[in-house]
Amino acid sequence: MSAVPSLAVSQRPARHDSDGLLEPGLRTALLRRLHTDHTTSSRDYLAAARRLLEELVADRRIVAGLELQRREGGYARNLLAGDERVGIWAMVWAPGAVTCIHDHHCSCCFGVVGGTVDEIWYRAVSETHAVAEAEHARGPGYVACMLPSGPNLHRMENRSAGDAISIHIYGYDHNRQGSSVHREYLALEN
């Protein structure tokens, strides 16, 4: 697979469009690396997504200079590139940002570009409740990929005093579904 193309300042659009923030040629190149066909195994897809994410998080230029949306006290999702099969998102995590406990209806890969995002893993004990099992601080360069078949029940949070930025690759059509979240859970104490 080829490396992430060089980003020139003039290639960085200032606004969102329905296909993403990145310049069209770069969007196409990145998405092409993630497209699969009937002969591609899940394992090969996840390996390709991991390689791409490793490159993206290693080179902050992919998000530097983009006008990423932010949400005070929460997190903001910014589509970088997307089509009917897959989407690449930059998430900006403000201090105190936290997701619900959730799983995913599609493949979910993420990597941390800057700052630290805490990931708390859960185990479902019913259709609506889960218990915490492990907690990890995910810093710059961290990359993980998972299939919807699991395990993928987690919550993410920025407990630091500064913003964190992560890049996520989700295997769904962002124009047809609002998010990758399949189900939300409530926490039970161990």
Image (cartoon, rainbow, N blue to C red):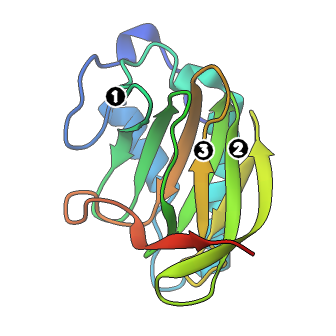
- On the image, which quarter does residue 116 sit in? top right
For marks 1 and 2, give the CA distance.
Answer: 20 Å
| Residue 168 in picture, x, y percent from top left | 52, 49
Q: Nearer the viewer, mark 1 or mark 2?
A: 2
Q: Can residue 113 be seen by looking at this rendering?
A: yes
Looking at the figure, which quarter contains the C terminus? Answer: bottom right
Name the residue located 25 percent from the left edge and 65 percent from the top edge.
Answer: 177
Q: What residue is pinned by disc 3?
A: 157
- On the image, which quarter does residue 46 sit in? bottom right
User: What amino acid is labelled 1 in the image?
Assistant: Glu
Q: Is residue 136 above or below residue 150?
A: above
Q: In the rendered structure, which disc, 1 or 2, sits on the residue that comes first in sequence?
A: 1
Outermost residue on the top side: it is 9
Q: Is residue 63 above or below residue 36?
A: above
Q: Which mark is residue 23?
A: 1
For marks 3 and 1, give the CA distance.
Answer: 30 Å
For marks 2 and 3, give the CA distance.
Answer: 21 Å
